[in-house]
Amino acid sequence: MRALGLDPVDDTRRTFDSLLAAVSRPGTVQSAPSPADHAVVSTLVDHEVTLATEDDTLEEALSGHGRIDAEPPETADIVHARGCTSWDVRECDRGSLVEPSGGATIVYRVDTVTGSTREDCVTATLTGPGVDGVATLSVSLPAAELSALAEAQSSYPRGVDAVFAGDGCVAALPRSVSVEVA
Amino acid sequence: MTDHATPPDGETPDDEPPDGGAPVPTDSVDAALASLDSDGVAGYNYAYLDEHTKRELRRSMLKAVAIPGHQVPYASRPMPLARGWGTGGIQASLSILGPDDIFKVIDQGADESVNAANIRRLAENTADVSTTTDTTEADLIQSRHRIPEEVLTDEQRLVLQVPITDALRMVDSSDAANRRRHAHKNYGKMWVHLYENVVEYGEIQIASRYPTMVADRYLMDPSPIPRWDVPKLDDADHLTVLAAGREARIYAVPPHTEVEPLAFEDRSFTVERFPGRACHACESTDTYLVEVSEGATESETDTFETRYTCNDSSFCEKRRTNPGIPKDHHLDREGVDWGPELSDVATDDAENATERGGNDE
């Protein structure tokens, strides 16, 4: 994805490494190539999955490689959101009971994502697989969006998985964790 | 019963190569390898797999971690070795590995088996990684049928090769029916199987692939690791990825996840015991031991001696030079030594070697 300023082999590998660490340890923030949301989407998306995005640069770069198969957010496998969404995350695909892995991955581009508490962010308290005791994650998203996300994950094992792409970093809220929005 | 020595018509009894083939020295493997012009990896992408394949694996791996214990299907590619020899593990490893990683491969606890050495060489040649046999140095460990004795840390990742993905396969061969059971967390048939074991043998007789509950939701086949290793997955510091190439499924146990082997209140889960045995080389009594039968003398007479030895050869080597070092010697925290407690040896008898019911392959 040189059009996005990312090395197609090395940067996607580093992004995946960060994503794997972030998903297996919810609440931790991992460094990733910048811009992190573009790196995450280009690491995961090709013509085998469907993508919903409103980012023209990303769309152009991916379609230049024949790697885009656009769908509306409600049915797409990977949904790219820049900050607040115009759609409801609760309407996104949660997969089926037999194949819950069909649930969507939501990639939020956010200004700030951090493991510590911040005043300008909404803090979520996390427990469950991957978390040693209790963890916190603060994201610069409205509390309503995080609550909606928690609701979209409440039908475990059906649900959506969220990735927050900040400034050169990623964090994740896989559906397996219990999220309590403060 | 007399004509077997005569070969059928048209078959030559000797092993002459067909015409036109370049002669390859066959006196040793090293000579054969040295005669080749290159490693044959020119033109391959970084880490052997093409990026399209890696994306497929990475997407599945992330979903597998997000749904602990659930088997996520993926498009398993043909690899330069036969399916069933660790192709799933290789694909997972090569999708993770980067040039800064240190890679360790073990096969039944041994670094030096042919399969492990070849997987290590493939990664060295194509992914430009350095390799090690020291568990504590490795960033990524690919293993067949064992979890190392030394405690894995939160920096490390373990990839286990899986021959059979579904724990329910031993009670029902129908994949479709088993997927429906997983969907509804309906594990009654497995409980009945365990109960029948207790009725028939007085205890649960499953040697390896012990059915294990992950995060109180999915029943998982922990791959053919011995029961000894299963408790190491519970609330571990490391991430475990289980990948099956032949069955094209991938599943995972994230760090700090509850992993509970199925058992009854009055018939608890027990690990293998080796009462009165110690490794003949390093004298360990707190490691998983295997029975080896070796010629007792150099003269190649047919007297064999049965001895016990550590299955984890790298840790055994360390204990030989540094006797009695704990399994958490490389960590600065206390009380993280893993593996079974040795205090309840009395509950065991020496007949564990005659276990039945495990269909290890």
Image (tube, coloured by chain):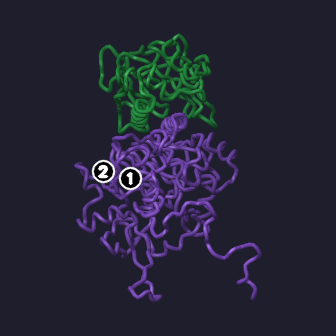
Residue placed furthest toward the front: B20
Q: Secondary structure at mark 1?
A: strand
Give how far across and how far down residue B240 sits, in percent.
44, 46
Question: Which residue type does callout 2 highlight?
Answer: Glu
Mark carried by residue A23: none
**Residue A44, relative to residue A182: is it above or below?**
below
Give the residue at x 42% y 16%: A143
Pinpoint the chain carrying mark 1. Answer: B
Q: Quadrant of the C terminus of chain B?
A: bottom right
Give how far across and how far down residue B358 sits, in percent.
57, 64
Give the residue at x 43% y 50%: B233
- Chain coloured green: A
**Chain B on-screen colour:** purple
* B339 with respect to B190 (left or right): left
Question: Which residue type does callout 1 highlight?
Answer: Lys
**Residue B291, relative to residue A182: is it above or below?**
below
Residue hosting label 2: B137
Give how far across and how far down residue A73 sits, in percent.
58, 18
**Could you say which is closer to the camera, residue B240 or residue B18?**
B18
Residue hosting label 1: B104
Q: Are marks 2 and 1 in contact (CB under 8 Å)?
A: yes
Category of crowding for the residue at label 1, using alpha-carbon neighbours closer than 10 angstroms: few (below 14), some (14–19), many (at least 20): many
Give the residue at x 42% y 69%: B273
Query: Which picture quadrant has residue B239?
Result: top left
Is tag 2's residue or tag 1's residue first in the polypeptide sequence?
Answer: 1
Tell me the distance, in whole angstroms, between the alpha carbons under discs 2 and 1: 9 Å
Residue B355 visible? The answer is yes
Labels 2, 1: one chain: yes
Pinpoint the chain carrying mark 2. Answer: B
Q: Secondary structure at mark 2?
A: helix
Q: Quadrant of the N terminus of chain B?
A: bottom right
Give how far across and how far down residue B105 sits, in percent.
42, 54
